[in-house]
Amino acid sequence: MEFLLYAAAGAFVGLIVGLTGIGGGSLMTPLLLLFQIPPHVAVGTDLLYAAITKASGVVSHHKHKNINWPIAGLMALGSLPAALATGLALKFYFSDYQQYTHIITTSLGVMLILTAVLLLFRNKLQEFATRSANPKKHSFLQKHKSGLTVCMGILLGVFVTLSSVGAGAIGTAILLILYPMLRSTNVVGTDLAHAVPLTLVGGLVHLSLGNVNYALLGALLIGSLPAIHIGTKLGSRLPEKLLRPALASLLMVIGAKYAFFS
C-alpha cells in the first residue's frame, strides 16, 4: 500500500510539474514530509528523483541548441563544489542526521518562500530582463556577471543540497537577471543543463550519508514519469494565470511553516 501511495504522490507532483513547469522539488519534498518521511531522506531521495526526471529534458534542449554551455559551466563552477562541501560539512561536523534536521527544514522553508515570490513576480522579472537587454548598458551586474554567476552558483549549491528546492525557479531568475539577452528557450535549457548535475551531485552526497530510500525513489519515478507527459498535454488548455498564483500561495504557506515554525 505504501508503494502505491508514493506512486500516486509521484503522479500528482508529475501532473503539476507538467501543467505549470514548476520544479518538482518545490512540491515533492513537502509532500514527502506530509507522509512522515524524515526530512533528510525526503531531501536526498527527491534530489536523485529530480536528476533522473530532468535528464531527458537536457538531451532534448541540447538537440535544439537551447543550452548556453559556458553559462551553465560558470554556474556549475560554483554550485558543484559547494554541494560537495555542504555534504562534507554534514558528514564531519554533525554526528548524526538528527543534529542537522532543523537546518534542512529551515532551508526548505526559505527556498519555498523564495520560489513562491518568484512565481508571483515572474512577469515583473521578465519585464526587468527585457529592459536590461540593451547591450549599450554597462550596469554593475553586466560588468561582473561572470563572477556573480559563480557566486550565485555557490549559494544554489549549498541550499539545493540542503533543501532540494531552487535549482529550477531560482536558477531561472538568476539567468534572467544576469543574462537578459538570452532567449526564453535558452534560459530554460541552460537552467536545466545546470540543474541536472547539481541535483545529481546533491543526491549522491545524500546517498553517501544514507539519506536515500530506493523503494521510495522507484515508486515516485513510476508514478511521475507518465503524469508529467499528461500534464504537459493538459497545460496548454488550463489558465496559467490561475495556476501559478494558487501554487505560489500554497508554497508560501508551507515555506513559512518550515522557515519559522519547524
Image (cartoon, rainbow, N blue to C red):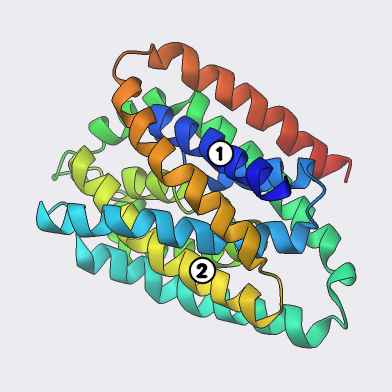
* Residue type at the position of mark 2: Ile
Q: Position of residue 13 (x, y in %)?
A: 54, 37
Asked whether residue 76 appears in the rendered view, the answer is yes
Apparent side of residue 259 relative to residue 217 in the rendered image (left or right): right
Q: Secondary structure at mark 2?
A: helix
In the rendered image, the vertical position of residue 70 relative to residue 30, given as above or below: below
In the rendered image, the vertical position of residue 57 relative to residue 248, given as above or below: below
Q: Which residue is mark 1?
A: 115
Q: Earlier in the sequence, mark 1 or mark 2?
A: 1
Name, please, the residue furthest toward the front: 1
Disc 2 residue crowd, few under 14, some 14–19, many 20+, Cα 10 Å: many
Residue depicted at x 59% and y 38% = 8
Question: Which quarter of the rendering shows the N terminus?
Answer: top right
* Residue type at the position of mark 1: Thr
In the rendered image, the vertical position of residue 246 relative to residue 102, given as above or below: above
Apparent side of residue 126 relative to residue 153 in the rendered image (left or right): left
Q: Are marks 1 and 2 in contact (CB under 8 Å)?
A: no
Q: Which residue is mark 2?
A: 154
Apparent side of residue 77 relative to residue 8 in the rendered image (left or right): left
Quadrant of res 78: bottom left
Apparent side of residue 166 relative to residue 52 in the rendered image (left or right): right
Q: Nearer the viewer, residue 11 or 169?
A: 11
Name, please, the residue furthest toward the left: 64
User: In this figure, what is the number of numbered marks?
Assistant: 2
Q: Secondary structure at mark 1?
A: helix
Q: Nearer the viewer, residue 36 or 88?
A: 36
Residue depicted at x 21% and y 59% = 59
Q: Position of residue 26 (x, y in %)?
A: 58, 42
Q: Nearer the viewer, residue 209 or 258?
A: 209
Residue depicted at x 22% and y 68% = 70
Q: Position of residue 173 (x, y in %)?
A: 41, 43
Tell me how far mark 1 sits from mark 2, CA to CA.
Answer: 18 Å
